[in-house]
Amino acid sequence: MLESSFTPRSRAQQAVSCLFLPSIVLLNLSAFALAYSQAASLELIVTLGSVFTLAAAWFLQRWLPLQATWNAPHADTRTDLVSMAVLLGAVDPVLKALGIAVAVWCVSQAPAWSSLFPSDLPFAAQVLLAVLLLELGKYAAHRLHHALPALWWLHAMHHSPKRFSAINNFRFHPLNYTINFSMSVLPMLLIGIPADVMWAYLAITQPVLMIQHANLDLRNPWLDKLFATPRSHLWHHDADERAGQLNFGSALLIWDHVFGTFRKVADGQMQPERIGLYAGSAYPAQASYLAQLLSMLKPPCCRRAGA
Ligand SMILES: [Zn+2]
């Protein structure tokens, strides 16, 4: 069972708990703005910002944990690392290359598609529109994975850890990751989103994603309403199936507010009693990464966990 209330913190811990998230977001956005103004590589600056944020979260977990017991070995780090290597080393680069190739082919067949994105708007307005549309696509993909039994079996890999740790964010079935990409990034490529607008979206959202599953006790009641922070996203990983159908947002919770799936995190509020797979789940969470990957092909695949 998780701790039922907030753990007392030193002044230094309270300050970092409050300032870490806004500082890291502002730092990443400032670096992006500087790179944009200097016509430097936006991909490089977003990548460096993501690596820095993930490293900072990884080390801070020891000092400022949501749950101190989650820092002990849980025999899940190997699966997390293999999944991270597969996603970042193969799946993500292939999807980006294929997505661009598909977009180029589609535009050659129907040139009007590539001008649907309003690239004549001011840059900030384009970024705002991109944030809304990309987050909507990811929100819809996430809800589908919870609603459809076959997709839930893919998404169960992401929900299988019984704790939060910075690298849990990279535990996704490649097909789950592909569907998310196909419902968010790919449509934006097809309608001609400018590359710098896409990088601006990533500069805003990547810092949040890098800390989202960290075992970090961040206390920002206002930011918990806007961003999918560790504390607000923790409720989505509630092992109680009915209670966990909320806070589906990827980096931002905008669409949860719109569609009524937002759960507020109040100061002093209890955390979920337990996180992880739903009671009675047949998903092989303790098996190897490869066994989990292929479990979709075996009975009782395509049955909602816990059903
Ligand atoms: Zn989920």
Image (cartoon, grey):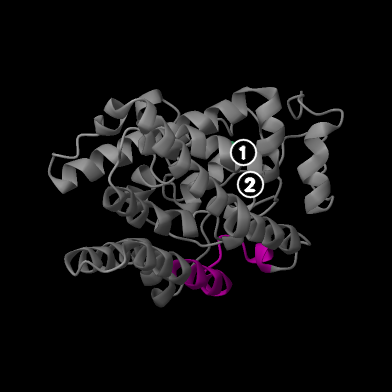
Query: What residue does disc 2 label?
Result: 172
Q: What stretch is highlighted in magenta?
A: 53-71
Does the image show residue 205? yes
The three-letter code of the residue at mark 2 reads Phe
Residue 2 horizontal side relative to residue 284, left or right:
left
Is residue 164 among what the camera can see?
Answer: no
Relative to 84, say whether 141 is above or below.
Answer: above
State yes or no: residue 11 in magenta.
no
Residue 219 figure quarter? bottom left
Q: In which quarter of the image is residue 156?
A: top right
Residue under the point 66% across and 54% down: 163
The image shows residue 171 at horizontal and vertical percentages of 64, 51
Q: In this view, does 25 lie to the left or right of 167?
A: left
Question: Residue 205 in the image: x percent, y percent?
Answer: 38, 52
Helix or strand or loop: what does disc 2 sit on?
Answer: loop
99 or 23, nearer to the observer: 99
- The x and y percentages for residue 18 are 36, 63
Quick check: 293 left or right of 236?
right
Cβ atoms under marks 2 and 1 closer than 8 Å: yes
Which residue is the site of mark 1?
A: 176
Q: Which amino acid does label 1 sit on?
A: Asn
Left or right of residue 113: residue 218 = right
Dot 2, how many residues are within 10 Å of its Cα: few (below 14), some (14-19), or many (20+)?
many
Which residue is at 44% across, 64% downward?
50
Q: Residue at x 67, y 31 (%)?
A: 152
